[in-house]
Image (spheres, grey):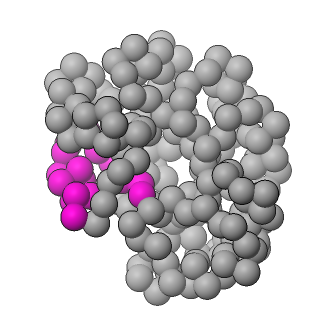
Amino acid sequence: MKQNNIRSVLSKHPTIPVVTFHELSEVVPQLEKLTSNGIQCIEITLRTAVSFEAIAEAKRTFGDRMDIGVGTLVSVAQIEKATALGVDFMVSPGINPTLSSALESSGIAFIPGVATPSEIISGLQLGWDTFKFFPAHLFGGLEALKTYGQVFPEVRFCPTGGIKADTYERYLELPNVLSVGGSWMQ
């Protein structure tokens, strides 16, 4: 399965909240709010000192009801720690040869970030066909994805970055978009 079956994870969740926790006390109330709104997936970013503890808390309290993912992975050590926590999926903002092998060998569904045709081609050379388009708003948004759909018809995307409540549905209408990530759902 390509990328440890990331497409099956993304296809279940058309919208994926991307959340940064600053305090552990925020985890349970935020996940309760998301699940009460019918959202069963979250990407927790590694942008604060409590990120891994927040992921552990999310897995412990909501792991049976939500797919818990980790985002902003930029090192092998982070991939190993996320794997040990048993996350459901991993997200990296870019493609890197060292991270690529660690992501593949983790056994956990993963999606690397791309913004340019060269990065997409790099991913295709690794045998991958599903990417995070990031940051979408800085790299052409909807128009870029329409073009990429023509140039790379086999590729599917999960765009994130600058997507808002009033634009996400337009992204989901594109045939090459499986899901959309963002912080507007918080």
Above or below for 25 versus 4: below
Q: Is residue 98 left or right of residue 182?
A: right
Name the residue rendered at 65%, 30% in the picture. Answer: 104
Position of residue 75 measured from the top left corner of the image (x, y, whole percent): 74, 33
Quarter of the image where one finds residue 107: top right
Above or below for 7 versus 66: above
Above or below for 6 versus 98: below
Residue 172 sits inside the magenta stretch:
yes
Q: Report the span colored magenta.
A: 166-182
Residue 19 sits inside the magenta stretch:
no
Name the residue rendered at 41%, 70% in the picture. Answer: 185
Position of residue 46 measured from the top left corner of the image (x, y, whole percent): 68, 51
Looking at the image, can residue 178 be seen? yes
Position of residue 17 measured from the top left corner of the image (x, y, whole percent): 47, 63
Q: Nearest the camera: 174 or 22?
A: 22
Quarter of the image where one finds residue 103: top right
Position of residue 173 measured from the top left corner of the image (x, y, whole percent): 17, 52
Name the residue rendered at 25%, 34% in the picture. Answer: 140
